[in-house]
Image (cartoon, rainbow, N blue to C red):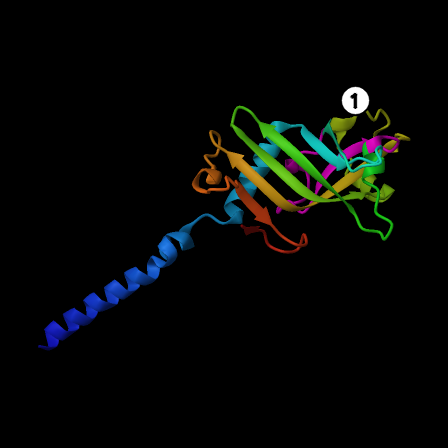
Amino acid sequence: RQLSLRGSMAVRMYVALAAIQSIDGHDLVARSRAPGPDTYIPYIKQTMDIAVVATLSTFSIDASTPNINTRIVFPKPTNVTQAPELEKVYFATNKYSRKFAEMAPGPNGELSRVNLLYWDPEGVGYVSIRGAALRCEDEEGDENYWDGWDQVYKQGPKTSFYNLIRIIPDHIEFESRDRFHVDLGDNRTDWRPLTLVRSVPTDPWKII
């Protein structure tokens, strides 16, 4: 009887555990083993560097009604930027350009919001970064100048019209179907791709 009782209790415990693991139709054990942000950040950074260029979207100041301007920029590669968790993305701009004006702080000092989009056609993937744009002071601009911009800024960081922009990411969307086999949007009714968010650069990234 003792062996039979023990066997019955073991079966009940197994059934209870199986029920817990399938709450809301999701296997909690499988969920705990799902890749976290640390798995995807290296893929995201590699995709950004493979793409080389990005499209920058800003709010237009040319029109009386809200509008958006988009253009190509050459961000500093992530592999030469000290930002292991994508705390920042740099690109150079002409301080007399429209995009420079459109990234000016607001009347109360609030930073403007922008979007950077990197496209990897061979990998059938992209990285979309949203964040605040900061127009860097001269010291930061000098320290973080990248020689890949020399063709435009002939005197390097001392070029009269050079200014460095620092993007502070807080929202990243990522897809890479062929290169890194990341296509989480296919499993969602809203087609949302892998999406990482955080409030400030010191916070860990979270998947939503």
> Is 89 included in the stretch rendered in magenta?
yes
Type of residue at label 1?
A: Gln
- Helix, strand or loop status at disc 1: loop
Q: Residue at x 61, y 28 (%)?
A: 51
Q: Is residue 15 above or below residue 196?
A: below
> Is 188 included in the stretch rendered in magenta?
no
Residue 17 position, x and y percent, is 29, 63
Q: Is residue 152 above or below residue 58?
A: above
Q: Is residue 122 above or below residue 59?
A: above
**Where is the N terminus found, in terms of image quarters?**
bottom left
Q: Residue furthest right?
A: 160
Taking the image as shown, residue 200 lies to the left or right of residue 173, namely right
Taking the image as shown, residue 88 lies to the left or right of residue 157, namely left
Depth check: 20 or 50 in front? 20
Circle 1 sits on which residue?
A: 151
Residue 180 position, x and y percent, is 48, 34
Label total for image = 1
Depth check: 98 or 39 in front? 98
**First to last magenta residue range:** 73-98
Q: Is residue 9 above or below residue 58?
A: below
Residue 117 position, x and y percent, is 65, 33
Depth check: 7 or 112 in front? 112
Taking the image as shown, residue 207 lies to the left or right of residue 30, namely right
Q: Residue at x 57, y 47 (%)?
A: 196
Residue 126 position, x and y percent, is 57, 32
